[in-house]
Image: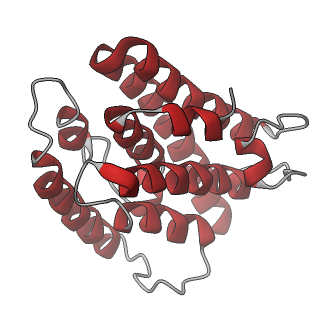
Amino acid sequence: MSLVDLIAAADERALAASGLACLDRCVPLLGGDDEVLRPLWGSLSEAADPADWSALLKEARTVLEDAEAAAGADPAPETDDEPVVLARRMLQDAPADRTGDALRAWAHTCSAASLRVHALLDPAEDPAPVDDRRAGRTDDMPPLVAAELRRQAVVLDVLAEHGPAGLRRALEVTVEGRRVLRAVVSRRARGRG
């Protein structure tokens, strides 16, 4: 199944996890640490109250905005660093409620944005548009894009198959992807410096 199909079939928990996983992998672009989104992950567990999502999201936004400011990142939305703009937009567009059509739209937006971030950061140019990748066209993908596409599919598959019990595996896949992106961002910063 393509990412588009997986998102279309996902329940609300899987949609929230999908969007959150994409954002979490891109946290290094915003100067955030590895634990900044952990409370949001916790709010997806079976024992958690879905209403907690809103307050936890607000906290995460504040922490990441402060991290960006401390790192000296340009807070203006018109900055020319497209990967940062895309990561920031994923955070800003997260719905306050963990329900409804807004959650599905956010999962789609985050999927496309995260793939675009990886395409922009991959030294090899991707010959296909992100929408083609999300629809299932996987030929000639650069390594970073291929790995991100695979991670997105794993998160959705594991939650579809195991429900809340799949959250641990989804988080493991996300942590692995965040480490990869952090290394890419670090190399990029050294190259600019």
Report the front residue among 190 and 129.
Answer: 129
Colour option used:
secondary structure
Q: Left or right? Give the position of 111 relative to 11.
A: right
Q: Position of residue 124 (x, y in %)?
A: 84, 48
Q: How many marks?
A: 0
Quadrant hosting residue 142: top right
Q: Left or right? Give the position of 52 relative to 91.
A: left
Picture residue at 23% right of the left edge, 39% below the top? 38
Residue 96 visible in this rendered orientation of the protein: yes
Picture residue at 34% right of the left edge, 59% below the top? 94
Q: Position of residue 157 (x, y in %)?
A: 52, 21
Quadrant of image for the N terminus: top right
Picture residue at 17% right of the left edge, 23% below the top? 46
Quadrant hosting residue 183: top right
Residue 193 visible in this rendered orientation of the protein: no
Quadrant hosting residue 113: bottom right
Picture residue at 34% right of the left edge, 38% below the top? 12
Q: Position of residue 53 (x, y in %)?
A: 17, 49
Quadrant of image for the C terminus: bottom right
Q: Left or right? Give the position of 91 relative to 29.
A: left
Q: Left or right? Give the position of 48 relative to 128.
A: left
Report the front residue among 15 and 144.
Answer: 15
